Image (tube, grey):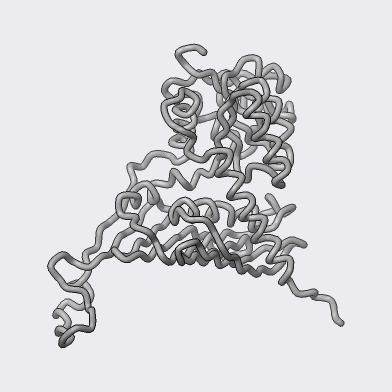
Amino acid sequence: MNDRIRMGVVGTGSLGFHHARILRDVEGVEMVGIHDARPQRAREVEAELGVTVHESLEALLDAADAVVVAVPTTAHEAVAVPALERGVHTLVEKPMAPDLAAADRMLAAAERGGAVVQIGHVERFNPAIRAAEPFLDHPLFVESHRMAPFTPRSTDVAVVLDLMIHDVDLVGSLVGRPVVDIAASGVPVLTPNVDIANARLTFEGGAVANLTASRVSVERMRKIRLFQPSGYLSLNLAEGTGEFLRLKKGIPALTGDGPIPAPPAEGLAGLVERIELRGDGAEPLRKELESFRDAVRGDRPPAVSGRAGREALALTLSIEARIRDHVPDPSPS
């Protein structure tokens, strides 16, 4: 391998375009080009970004040490397996695959080729999440809302695989325990697939997460709240900001022992310390690509390993299955 890691991008839709844009100036990376099954789109990206177009996947793999796979989910396996079997390290966008069998074949290919697999759960790199990390302390209740206006994109799958999977992975990483129970429901509103869904996850140890995802909302929302013994975290993932509220030092908790103290004149503000959370402003996708570079170098494990990506997929598919069991038949009896 050269001093700089040679990276390319397969698939230059909306997300793949930004991968290609950022890779041009990531330190320690040489951007060797793109491949897209749509020649016209490839030429458009070539003209806008000044990147090299490779006419075939094989040509790009010949030139690269590592690739980003940003094609539609149904095509992930067809691109990732040849890359991994050749030992080309691969960052696969989420969801890892359309089903677990495909995910397993990708992991097997990585093992045969001795290649790194990282899954593109970019919310792990959200500035609000990174700013909150020093204050995380065994969350016991988590609530997330991921709402978006309707667009025709990704309507071939339910909103669980389209949007909720972000929070399934994120919450799982924050709680750090396996899920032991799932309850879920959802409704198809504008498409034949479920467009709004709710899932309640119970984790080993008793923590609970309540996740809501919608692609038929009037406004966009990406928020997550975490309640833990040390305080309360409220994070706005869309803005990359948040706050941590905790009892001020020197003020005893209301334990019920003895008389209840009189409330301070300033109300809750007199009891609670508010810590503003704000990231460094770095683009999450850039942080993700830098972490992939580090994993390829062997400096650290992948931020979201192939196994972790498979776990998120398995859990999301279980949520989807439970929703299918509960979607009522709209036809008259």
Foreground: 39 or 106?
A: 106
Q: Residue at x 57, y 19 (%)?
A: 65
Left or right: 19, with 253 as reference point = right
Residue occupying the far right of the picture: 333
Q: Residue at x 16, y 86 (%)?
A: 258
Count of labels in the image: 0
Image quadrant in which you'd find residue 93: top right
Any part of residue 276 in sight: yes
Q: Residue at x 68, y 36 (%)?
A: 71
Specify the quadrant that holds the C terminus: bottom right
Q: Residue at x 47, y 29 (%)?
A: 295
Left or right: 205, with 102 as reference point = left
Any part of residue 48 in sight: no
Q: From the top left corner, tell me how far across and down residue 226 is, in percent.
A: 40, 62
Residue occupying the far front of the picture: 205
Residue occupying the far bottom of the picture: 259
Foreground: 218 or 145?
A: 145
Image quadrant in which you'd find residue 90: top right
Q: From the top left corner, tell me how far across and down residue 115 is, in percent.
A: 58, 25
Left or right: 111, with 243 as reference point = right
Image quadrant in which you'd find residue 6: top right
- Rendered position, 138 above or below 325: above
Q: From the top left corner, tell me how far across and down residue 301 is, in percent.
A: 46, 33
Foreground: 153 or 106?
A: 106
Q: From the top left corner, tell me how far across and down residue 100 is, in percent.
A: 70, 46
Foreground: 64 or 174?
A: 174
